[in-house]
Image (cartoon, rainbow, N blue to C red):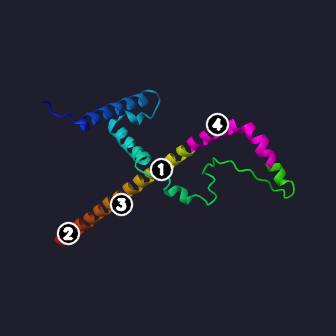
Amino acid sequence: MDAPVQTKPVMDRIELQVREAIRRRVAEHGGSAEYRDPKLFERVWSLLGHATDGRRPDFLLLPELLDESRDWDLQTQLSLSSHRRALGPIILLVKRRVLLPLSRWLLEYTRENFRRQQRVNRLLFACIEELAIENARLRLELERTETTEETETHRETEKRRQTE
């Protein structure tokens, strides 16, 4: 009887080959020259992959920082209204019965495009947030390293003073 095939190593190898093909294609066709470095490409791939796959784009910090108007949030629902009190109901009736059926195909076409754009916007927000997190984490590590080096330098200076 044959031993069972382990799928994880096979899938990992296939994913690595696909990423390598993408890296070469991006580098050869005008993408960033930095992608010639496979380690850097893997890091970028990992960061962007985490931003797009590992998060719920409805819960991000960047939209919270934007103003309350939510202008960045695309609205795909059509709402008909009128500011006229007397003629308003008649105008809305004409819009609903005549104009809306005539333009329904355009509405459906644009609604799907709005949905796609909404998804792209949220993914971009997630990517920006992930990069901001990475930047903040690296800055904190750098500050800790600098503080540690300053402390060590201070200790060495004090030791020299004491021995002199």
Q: Amino acid at mark 4?
A: Tyr
Q: Identify the element where label 3 is drawn.
A: helix
Residue drawn at the location 74% of the way across and 42% of the way down? 100
Which residues are drawn in magenta? 93-117
Q: Which residue is mark 4?
A: 109
- The CA distance from mark 2 to mark 4 is 75 Å
**Residue furthest out toward the left:** 1
Sequence-wise, which precedes: disc 3 or disc 4?
A: 4
| Residue most extreme to the bottom | 162
Q: Residues within 10 Å of mark 2 (few under 14, many from 20)?
A: few
Q: Residue at x 51, y 46 (%)?
A: 124
User: Could you tell which of marks 2 and 4 lies nearer the N-terminus?
Assistant: 4
The numbered mark, 1 or 4, whose residue comes first in the sequence reads 4
Name which residue type carries label 3.
Glu
Front residue of this view, candidates 106 and 50: 106
Q: Secondary structure at mark 4?
A: helix
Mark 1 or 4, closer to the camera:
4
Q: Is 153 located above or below residue 111 in the figure?
A: below
* Nearer to me, 75 or 32: 75
Q: Nearer the viewer, residue 110 or 36?
A: 110
Which numbered disc, 2 or 4, marks the residue closer to the eye? 4
Asked if marks 1 and 3 touch (Cβ < 8 Å), the reply is no
Name the kind of residue labelled 2 in the image.
Answer: Lys
Image vertical order of residue 158 relative to residue 48, above or below: below
Q: Which residue position holds label 3?
A: 143
Query: Of residues 28 and 159, which is closer to you in this image?
Result: 28
Is most of the magenta stretch helix, strand or loop? Answer: helix
Distance Cα–Cα, label 1 vs label 2: 49 Å
The residue identified by callout 2 is 159
